[in-house]
Amino acid sequence: MAAGNNYPKLHNAMWPGLVGKGPDSEPPIDLDTMIALTAKAEVNGVKFDGIDIFHAAPHTNIDFTDDEAKQLAEKAASNGLAIGSIVAPVWPPVGGGSALGTPKDRTKFVTTMRQ
């Protein structure tokens, strides 16, 4: 009997821990808590396979070192999760800018993507 298809992989996005949070709202949810909650979540025996990182403070430093990247990967793996993608902080509230905006916005967008 052939093995079943185990795709698509189910990933939890980490951006809800940051977006809409802050001084005017509730505090950000730290990355360790987001990872722990994701690792523990289960519905009808289905669990998350990984996480998608929103690459913005306070979760991560966009200019992280190779060692910091390895530590993040190890943290995810130690919780039974893979990192599927890292989303650049292109939104204006986190330092980015619109690719379709003003020249200043486009410069911010491109700078963020390069980082």
Image (spheres, helix red, strand yellow):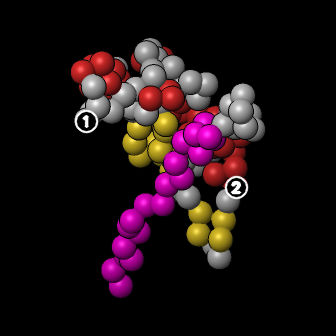
Q: For residue 102, say whether it is visible.
A: yes
- For the record, the magenta segment spans 1-20
Q: Position of residue 113 (x, y in %)?
A: 30, 27
Q: Residue at x 29, y 31 (%)?
A: 101
Q: Which mark is residue 40?
A: 2
Q: Is residue 15 above or below residue 101?
A: below
Between residue 44 and residue 14, name the one nearer to us.
14
Residue placed under numbered mark 1 in the picture? 100
Q: Quadrant of the C terminus?
A: top left
Location of residue 109 (image quadrant)? top left
Q: Residue, x 64% and y 51% (percent of image)?
A: 38
Residue that appears at 62% across and 40% down: 20
Question: x, y percentage for residue 49?
Answer: 51, 56
Asked if residue 63 is among those painted magenta in the image, a careful observer would answer no
Q: CA distance from mark 1 to mark 2?
A: 39 Å
Q: Give the SS element for disc 2.
A: helix
Badges 1 and 2: C-beta atoms under 8 Å apart? no
Instruction: Locate the N terminus by quadrant.
Output: bottom left
Name the side, left or right, on which 94 lies relative to 86.
right
Compared to 115, does 46 lie above or below?
A: below
- Relative to residue 62, is residue 7 depicted above or below? below
Q: Earlier in the sequence, mark 1 or mark 2?
A: 2
